Image (cartoon, rainbow, N blue to C red):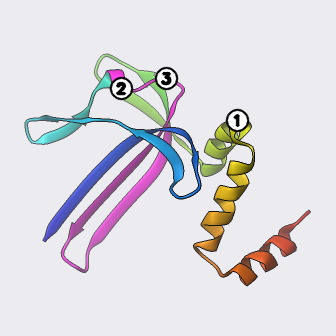
């Protein structure tokens, strides 16, 4: 069984559960392709692009990244790859403790609470 999904959303803030708050862009079908409208993108804004394609139980490709819209031409949107640190830095200015809470939440999804405390203690400045 083959499954596919593609999502693109403008990042509007931080979210404790999902990492980022997003406003998802609407896809429009043109022939056999799904595309986004140029007018839905804004220069200087950050977008998350996620794509997952599966073909059977053993093959799965999942791509996810964050990008800043740097230019819009007559028929293209030019995106620049952003690191998670860049995104959090930009959003963190107005989100205070949400940044720290989000990072702790993500950490606890990977390690136990005791391991998290040990890592934080080890890396505290």
Where is residue 114 shown, x and y percent of the image?
Answer: 74, 83
Residue 47 lies in magenta, yes or no?
yes
Residue shown at the point (69%, 50%) measured from the top left: 99
Boundaries of the magenta span:
39-67
Q: Quick check: 107 left or right of 1?
A: right
| Position above or below: 2 against 43 | below
Where is residue 11 shown, x and y percent of the image?
Answer: 50, 39
| Position above or below: 92 against 74 | below
Q: Quick check: 57 left or right of 7?
A: left
Residue 91 sits in quarter: top right
In front: mark 3 or mark 2? 2
Mark 1 or mark 3, which is nearer the start of the sequence? 3
Residue 27 sits in quarter: top left
User: Whole-Å distance between the Cαs marked 2 and 1?
Assistant: 24 Å
Residue shown at the point (37%, 42%) measured from the top left: 8
On the rendered image, what quadrant is the N terminus found in? bottom left
In front: mark 3 or mark 1? 1
Tell me the tag on residue 42: none
Residue 104 sits in quarter: bottom right
Q: Which residue is mark 1?
A: 94
Residue shown at the point (23%, 67%) measured from the top left: 54
Tell me the tag on residue 40: 2
Q: Which residue is mark 3?
A: 43
Question: Do the residues under discs 3 and 1 have CB atoms within 8 angstroms?
Answer: no
Crowd rating for badge 1 (residues with CA inside 10 Å; few <14, some 14–19, many 20+): few
The residue at the far top in this view is 74
Q: Quick check: 33 left or right of 16?
A: left
Of 40 and 94, nearer the camera is 94
Q: Quick check: 41 left or right of 21?
A: left
Where is residue 55 shown, x and y percent of the image?
Answer: 19, 70
Residue shown at the point (84%, 69%) measured from the top left: 123
């Amino acid at each position: 069984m083959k499954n596919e999904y593609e999502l693109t959303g403008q990042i509007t803030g931080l979210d404790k559960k999902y990492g980022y708050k997003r406003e998802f862009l609407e896809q429009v079908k043109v022939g056999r392709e799904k595309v986004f409208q140029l007018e839905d993108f804004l220069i200087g804004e950050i977008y998350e692009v996620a794509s997952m394609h599966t073909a059977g139980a053993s093959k799965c490709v999942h791509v996810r990244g964050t990008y800043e819209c740097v230019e819009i031409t007559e028929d293209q949107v030019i995106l620049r790859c952003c690191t998670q640190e860049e995104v959090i830095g930009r959003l963190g200015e107005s989100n205070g403790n949400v940044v720290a809470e989000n990072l702790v939440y993500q950490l606890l999804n990977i390690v136990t609470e005791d391991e998290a405390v040990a890592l934080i203690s080890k890396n505290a400045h």
